[in-house]
Amino acid sequence: MAEAESLSRSSGAETILDCISDGVITIDLDKRVTFLNRAMQTMLGYDVPDSGRLLACDVLIQSNICSSQDCVLERALRGERVSNFEAMVRRRDGIQMPVSINTDFLLDKEGKLIGLIEVIRDISLARELCAKTAEVSELKHRLGEQVQFDHIVGRSRLMQNIFAKLPAIAASKSTVLITGESGTGKELIAYALHAHSPRKHAPFVVVNGSSLSEGVLESELFGHVKGAFTDAYVDKPGRFEIANGGTIFLDEIGEMSLATQVKLLGVLERGRLERVGSNETISVDVRIVAATNRNLEAAVQEGRFREDLYYRIRVIPIVLPPLRDRADDIPLLVNHYREKFNREMGKHIGGLSPQSLTALEQYPFPGNIRELQNVMEHAFVCCEEPTIQFEHLPDDLQRYYWEHREWNDTESLQAIERQAICRALDKSGWHFKEASQQLGIGRSTLWRKVKQFDIKQEL
């Protein structure tokens, strides 16, 4: 004890050890702490013990190796020194902290073991950096597996064909027309083309042709000068000027009037425009990416869309498939949104039940990827469990599942009927009137079926 006690009382030794950034602690053979330097005090959140009061090491330093064969003091008694041994230590505030431990023996003048000195280093930051590195590595691996372009998820053959073309399209200056149903991700493709193009450091400007009236749309696209119309109090640049050097995304281009189409064609052909109310010509260098959910060929035939403009914007066509034609991508998209909503909502949902995933895979998703995202958000809001269950999905999707499910030969009609009754009762809180309405049967029939199948309410 003399050597350890001498160290604990020596002001010179304490001063030196207090200058060390790692924690230093000495322990006698009775597992009592005899010294604790300032770094160790800060690390644990405890005050240094009074010189006259020795604390048990497993009280002061609550580690996952205490009372185990990995206890460093027990190993010292067996003649072992510890080098870079990783363990977990519990701080005063309850937080578990990863540490690296190095030890050496404390000996008296005769060379007899009287205690142990530990040098403890906080490695939480190193662990965090390693975790981040692993996370990035895993992300790169997943991106490779899923054949992603930017944040667009898909490994179906249809999406792989599109991904294969996108880098070359992004590097070009050609005008692109993206067609597809609403919710298929047309704006996401447009932004990905811009973000991977030589224009990526210039503006990406979005204009929705269906959200603005004809007069307002023309002013938004080409700008106006002061006094051009009522409320035009100052000169205003248009979206083409703002996008100069970059990319302009003309969403729902099929909704633009013929008059606006004429002016747009002029910008495409000459690279020049005039603000509303002005005769001054302004030159712009803008790449155009257009999109529509309409059949522009039919609109041309009907005289609602200019043929010359159609072929001018359709230099490179990209057709996005609806989600129902790329069902192979649904599990990937589901996982993508699971990770997204876990981050946003602070939840830790690990996955979906088999029945839930089957319901999603067989649903036609008329709203495409946007609808799938909304379905997943609905499920996350309703789910307070580790796994999303079938009942967490929206009602209309549940109904579609039951109406269109292909039953296995091994499932009896009675089993199907019993399952449907249990669902209706659970959903209605065992209110028979409501449950019978859901099932489309009378209350007396429901009572009889409950007795027949021996269905009992779980308390």
Image (tube, helix red, strand yellow):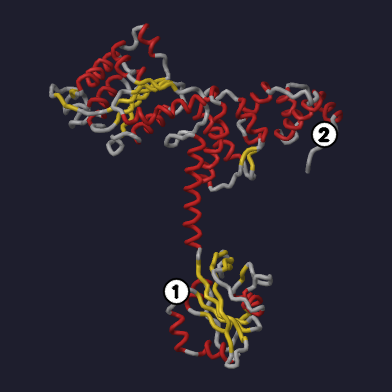
Which part of the image, by quadrant, shows the N terminus? bottom right
Vertical placement of residue 178 versus 353, above or below:
above
In the rendered image, is residue 367 in sight? Answer: no
Amino acid, disc 2: Ile
Residue toward you, 222 or 26: 26
- Up-down: is 170 above or below 340? above
Count residues near mark 1 (Cα–Cα under 10 Å), then give few for <14, some for 14-19, many for 20+.
some
Residue in view at x 53 percent, y 42 percent: 339
Query: Real-space Cα distance between discs 2 and 1?
Result: 66 Å
Which residue is identified by label 2? 455
Badge 1 amino acid: Ser
Residue closest to the far left: 280
- Res 253 seen here: yes
Q: Give residue 21's mark.
A: 1
Q: Position of residue 31 (x, y in %)?
A: 64, 80
**Residue at screen point 55% across, 88% down:** 51
Which numbered disc flags the more N-terminal residue, 2 or 1?
1
